[in-house]
Amino acid sequence: MSISIPPGLKKAVETGNLVLFVGAGLSYNLKNSSGAKLGGWNDLVTAILDHLIELGHDDVAEPLKQLVGKYDPITILDLIESHKQSPLDDISDFVKSFFKLHEDNNYDLHRDLYGLSRIIVTTNYDCAFETAVDELRDNKAYKGKNHELARYRKDDAPMLFKLHGCVEDADSMVLFPSGYRELYDNDSIDAEHVLWVLGNIIYNKTILFLGTGLGDYQINNIFKRIGRLLGKHNQKHFIITTQNRLDSTLENFLSPITISSYDRVSQVIGQLLDIKRSAENEKNAQDQIYRRQLEELGEKTKSLEEQLKREQSESNMLKILLNREAINRFAMGVKHSLVEEYLEASGEYKAATEIKSNFHQAYNNWGNALESLASKKSGEESEDLYVQAFEKYGLATKYKSDYHQAYNNWGNALESLASKKSGEESEDLYAQAFEK
């Protein structure tokens, strides 16, 4: 039985606008080099306390072991950190060894996730993604390596953003409460850089959270940060969870994809990969349309050149020259569309229609370019681009009333905007899309 995928998430996958945010749940069943399961936060805290006992720090560990399962792990970590006898350097070394992975782990899901999105944010310290995907070994950022976050500015550049540090560098790991305060409440350049990228992702991308418990201290910190950053900004993100309802403080920006058990996470990812493959096939089909357009435009240009050689009338020669220039600008727009340079493409389509006001193909392509730009934006900027796209499709069908391709594109654009809305506004847009 398939799992319902929200339209907004589907659109993010189709347009390549998805970022994955991966929590500890994804590493739960991985084994470390000692053969022990990594488990969750309680397992880590228990392992740290057992290690302290082995080191002879019973006075620190024994009282706290009684609290495991009764108090949040972060509370116990706070007590460990604040105890004067706690050997914090030894704990750091132990945590580093605890997260060293066994060579027999299965990383199929990690590979599938990278196939779904090349930008992955994780709070996990382990090197599961780097082990699963060679490309991520040299394309990761964490505290001390935040200069690597500059890669995020490059379209489609792979990036593994290890928000709370990496086991390869124990100093980078955010484990104790003081580390979280330093990251989220500090004005240091390091913290500022991290939060700039996180904010940029929150505003401009659609995030899918998985392996994240809604009660985790780590995740709650991030949710609070997202809530503060977004305010009333209308950008929806998604979380795979076993809960049907979210806390009211999360509902403004987070929608649940409810599953019966976490064993079904791989099924959700499989469905999303199918959506991505289908979108890639459609893009290939659209690229073929663009290439056919270029071939046809080339033939039209040759024909106009021949007419120009034969024409004697200056007024007719001027018409041919203007028509040729409109075709040339349209062709330049098509070339930009082929390489997804939609802003540049829009400029060329605009120029083509200024020369030839009834150029229906240029209006249609212009609408496509604007819709592609809109799908990667959010809020008012996105909505304004959608409205402009609708206007262009309207002009395309005005000048060619049976232009079925433009009607189809118009309907798809209406559906895209509807997926970003909710309630009656969304239903009205879907109804308009159906009419097209």
Image: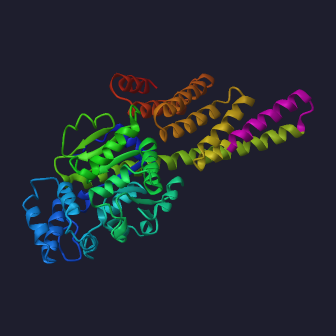
Question: At 82% across and 30% down in the image, what residue appears?
Answer: 319
The location of residue 40, given as percent across then percent down, is 19, 60
Residue 88: image quadrant is: bottom left
The percent coordinates of residue 4 (x first, y second) are 27, 41
- Most distant residue in the front direction: 84
Q: Point out residue 128 in the picture as x, y percentages from the top left corner.
A: 32, 67
Q: Is residue 31 left or right of residue 109?
A: left
Is 290 covered by the magenta stretch?
no
Magenta stretch: includes residue 326: yes
Say if residue 432 shows up in the picture: yes
> Which of the pair 130/188 is nearer the observer?
188
- Measured along the vertical axis of the image, is residue 2 above or below residue 144? above
Give whichever of 298, 113 is nearer the camera.
113
**Residue name at image x 19 percent, y 53 percent:** 262
In this figure, what is the number of numbered marks?
0
* Majority secondary structure in the magenta region: helix
Magenta stretch bounds: 310-332
Question: Foreground: 130 or 195?
Answer: 195
Residue 28 visible in the picture: no
* Percent of width and height locating residue 35: 18, 75
Q: Image height check: is 51 above or below 225?
A: below
Front residue (pair 385, 42): 42
Determine the image quadrant of residue 406.
top right
Q: How is the image coloured?
A: rainbow
Most extreme residue toward the left, as rendered? Answer: 66
- The residue at the point 30 percent across, 64 percent down is 108
